[in-house]
Every structure is written in C-alpha cells, then in structure tokens.
Amino acid sequence: MSRKPTAEIISIGNELLIGHTLDTNSHWIAKHLTRLGWTLDRVTQLRDSLDSIKSGVRGSLKRNPSVLITIGGLGPTHDDMTLAGISRAIDKPMRLNKEALQLVKDHYRRLESKPKLTKYRTKMATLPQGSVPLPNPVGTAPGVKMQQSKTILFSLPGVPSEMKAIFRASIIPYLESFHTTRPKEVEIKITGIIESALAPILDQARKIYPRLYFKSHPRGRETGIRPLILLHIYNIEPGAEKEISEASARIMLRLAGIRARSSLIMKK
Amino acid sequence: MSRKPTAEIISIGNELLIGHTLDTNSHWIAKHLTRLGWTLDRVTQLRDSLDSIKSGVRGSLKRNPSVLITIGGLGPTHDDMTLAGISRAIDKPMRLNKEALQLVKDHYRRLESKPKLTKYRTKMATLPQGSVPLPNPVGTAPGVKMQQSKTILFSLPGVPSEMKAIFRASIIPYLESFHTTRPKEVEIKITGIIESALAPILDQARKIYPRLYFKSHPRGRETGIRPLILLHIYNIEPGAEKEISEASARIMLRLAGIRARSSLIMKK
C-alpha cells in the first residue's frame, strides 16, 4: 500500500471547551494511530450540542477519512447526545438495537439481581440505524461502529478506561488489518544554536531527503540562545530508514561545524 | 449583551497529530476564554499542510465566530506555514510588513551586534495583507491580528511561553472590552450512586432550571458503583447565581434521600 490510511478524531464534551478537562483521549489515540502507521489528519473538539455534532461529523465525512473516531457523549444522561447528532449528520434514524440492548442488560445483570431497563439505560442501546455495537469490557455504554460511504465511523465513550478498553478490543484489530508499516523516527537534541540558524541546515536536508519529515521543537525561552532544540526526523514512506541515518549524520556534522552540540536518540 | 461572544481555536502542528505533544495551549486558552465569559465553540488540530490550514481556517470563518485564534506555525522554518495557509484561506497575498520587520529587527539587535536579516528572519515579518503585528515580549515571531468579515483572527506562536505572553498582552484586553460576565459554577462530589440513577435527578433539575447547565463526570471504573461522580453546575446566562444555590440544594437533598453522599464546592 503506497498511501497510508487516514483518520480523524472528533472529541465531544463541553468540559473540554470550557478548559475543565484536557483532551488526553485524542492524544492517546493519536499515539496509537501513528504507531500503527496511520495518519491522523485532524482532531476536532465539539460542544454537547446536536447542531455542533451534526455539523462537525458532516464536515469530517466530506473529507473521506478511512476512519472517523468520535469520543464522548454515549452515556445515559440527557447531555450525552453524540449518537443523536451522528444520526442527524448521516440521515439515519435512531433505533433500539437488540444486540446493544443485550450488552446493556448483561452489564446491569452483573450489578443488580433484577435490573430494570429504565429509559436512561435503553438510551445507551438506541443507535443510528445500521450500527454495530462494540462490547464495553469495563463499563455500560457500548461502543458503536458503522459504515458511511468510504469511512468507517467508530464511537467511543469519553471515560478514558472505557474508551481505551473498547479501542484495544475492537479498533486496533481493524487498524492492524491494513498492514501498514510503522514510521521510523530519530530525535536529535541540539544546544548552542538559535532556531533561525538551524533553519538553512534543515532546508538543505529537506531538499536532499524529500521523503523524510523534519520538525524542530524549541524548548524554553529564546533569551539569546534557546536552551534546547529537539529535532525529530521521521520517514513518511516505508523503507526510508537508511535515509534517516544519513540525514541525521549530515545534520550533526554541520552542527558540529558551527560549534552547536547535538546528540542522537533512536526512537523505538 | 444577551448573547455571549463566541470563539474558535485552530491549533497547528504535526507534533499534535502524531501524539508527540499534548495540546495544552488550547486548554490554557479555553480556561481564559471561559473565565472572561466567552464561549469557545470548537477547537481544531491541523497538520502542517497548506491545504489543511486553508480548509480549516475557511471552515471556521464560515461559522462566523467573534474571534478565531490560531496557534503554532509562525517560526522561521519551512514547516511553519500557518500564515501562508491563512493567506490562501482569505485570498490576501503575503507581504513584507514594515511594522513586523521592525519588531524582528529589534529582537535580533538585542542578540547580535550586527544582525543579518536572512530570509528565515524576514519570513517572520511576511504576513497576509492587512495584518497588524502583535509584539512578542519573549521571542522573535510577532503575533498577528486581522479582521475578516465579522471575525477577528489572531495568530499566536506555538511555543507556550510566547503564546501566553502575546495572549496576555494583546488578546486579553480585546476580550475584556466585550464586558461579558463570568459564569458562576459549583462542583458537587457524589459517592454511593451509579450514573444511571443520577440521570433522572438531573433531568428533573434541568426542567426546573432551564437556564443552568448540568454536567456529570464519572471518575474511575464502573465496577458496580462508580467511586465518584463529579457534578458541575453552571449558569449559562448572567444573574443565575441564586438558581445555582437552589438547584444544588435540591439535588443534594434528593441524593441524601437515596443514601448517596454529596459535598459541595463553590468554584471561584
């Protein structure tokens, strides 16, 4: 496969947008997608609002990612409206899903001798038509999988332990089935140089190694000389490991020539 | 003002989407916007790609937020392409900005006796036509402000210390000029109840207090009973402080009635 499969994430919850909660869920999934050789193109954080979810999901589907993962808003309460928003975005009505209802029933049977199926509980089994529920090994609300044109849409709950459990059990096997190769990466720690002096060195390297991706991250304040610049070099296509070694050596030699110090770390 | 002004954030950088860097910048700005009585409607994380930035900025401007803040990609290197992307999104050519060039010159004059204006340095002073540069008190790349239809667009560098310094010096005064009132908020810590049992209590409270916003956050695994649910209650319109007190008291009394424990914290 020459072109790597692409993904988008939509993370839903007012708690993110009022600055209460840091969106570590997207970050965790981003790491996994990268490790599996997938390209995450966009992350969107949206409010708990039907209009906002509808518009965000429609916008994402128009870009045709291979996979769209939504996080959050699958619980029993009124403000959990992800699936209703998706239902509007894709014009599929909400229906009680028998398989999902069984998962919810099984969950409460472990908690109560005679579990009652309140409307709050059946809400978690009411999914857009055509959805496949994904078992939640550590909580109640099932995950959801559905096909929409060229995109597979996954919906995961926002509680991190539940999000991770469903991602590991149901999404990783799907992502792995594409057999993509993981990108190789090195990190070079550089001191004794300012970023604008590093720029021409990187520009030259980019011309010589167009298949590689160079990204410099200054750390600390620029009071004269940055205390530290971290330079990451990846290959963006399979089989460019040798080029990474050559590019790293070339850059470190040029840095030594202008008396900047650098050290290389191979990322696993 | 009855309707609170709205904001969007676009955070740019491959390091976010490969899971290297957690987007703490957006989170920090989200907190400040909320404190100042602004509503943050959407956060988007985009890759360092002209097409991606153009499409993300256009999409945001179509929604007409009062303010759009972009973070990242203002540095001297080739992969910092935020302003070029914005230039394409708003159809304004890139021009060397005299005022910005002066800021860049002043910066390097403090570092070097005879600063040279390399193309990497003038790049940071090349802005979409009609831009106003914002001084960067702790780094080189100036921030940028421009008006686009009903939206004021601010661009900030991605290095957190620089982002914060420009935000404090140039954006907070602008946000404060809208004289919005900060939302009031309480947090109730609840133990001894499952989320689906809390749901009907919250539904009733929502009906009685439609101006308030109730959001429950389960913490920990749902092995039978959640160890802890954090319930946040905000007013979404000015002057609903009394309603928050009444709603909190009502909910805590009902919780006591079903032997769940709760304690209230007034957020400042």
Image: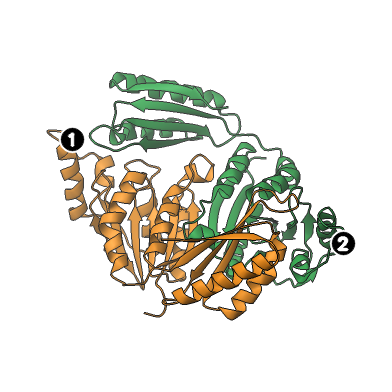
Chain colours: A green, B orange
Amino acid identity at mark 1: Leu
Please state if B181 lies on the left or on the right of A124 as rendered: left
Which quadrant holds the N terminus of chain B? bottom left
Q: In the image, is A67 to the left or to the right of B48?
A: right
Q: Is residue B127 left or right of residue A176?
A: left
Q: Residue furthest left?
A: B113
Residue underneath mark 2 = A114
Q: Residues within 10 Å of mark 1 (few under 14, many from 20)?
A: few
Q: Is B44 left, or right, of B250 in this rendering?
A: left
Residue drawn at 59 percent across, 53 percent down: A8
Q: Are marks 1 and 2 in contact (CB under 8 Å)?
A: no
Write down the chain letter for disc 1: B
Residue in front for this viewpoint, B186 or B260: B260
Q: Position of residue B205 (x, y in %)?
A: 61, 75
What distance separates the C-alpha of mark 1 from that of mark 2? 74 Å
Q: Chain of mark 2?
A: A
In the foreground, B256 or A212: B256
Q: Residues within 10 Å of mark 2 (few under 14, many from 20)?
A: few
Identify residue type, mark 2.
Lys
Quadrant position of residue A229: top left
Residue A52 appears anywhere in the view = no
Q: Secondary structure at mark 2?
A: loop
The C terminus of chain B sits in image quarter: bottom left
Q: Position of residue A95 (x, y in %)?
A: 79, 70
Q: Which residue in the protein does label 1 denote?
A: B111
Position of residue A189 measured from the top left corner of the image (x, y, whole percent): 40, 26
Q: Which image quarter: residue A235?
A: top right
What residue appears at the point 49 percent right and 68 percent down from the top-left corner?
B234
**What x and y, as percent, mark residue A6?**
62, 48
Q: Residue at x 43, y 71 (%)?
A: B64
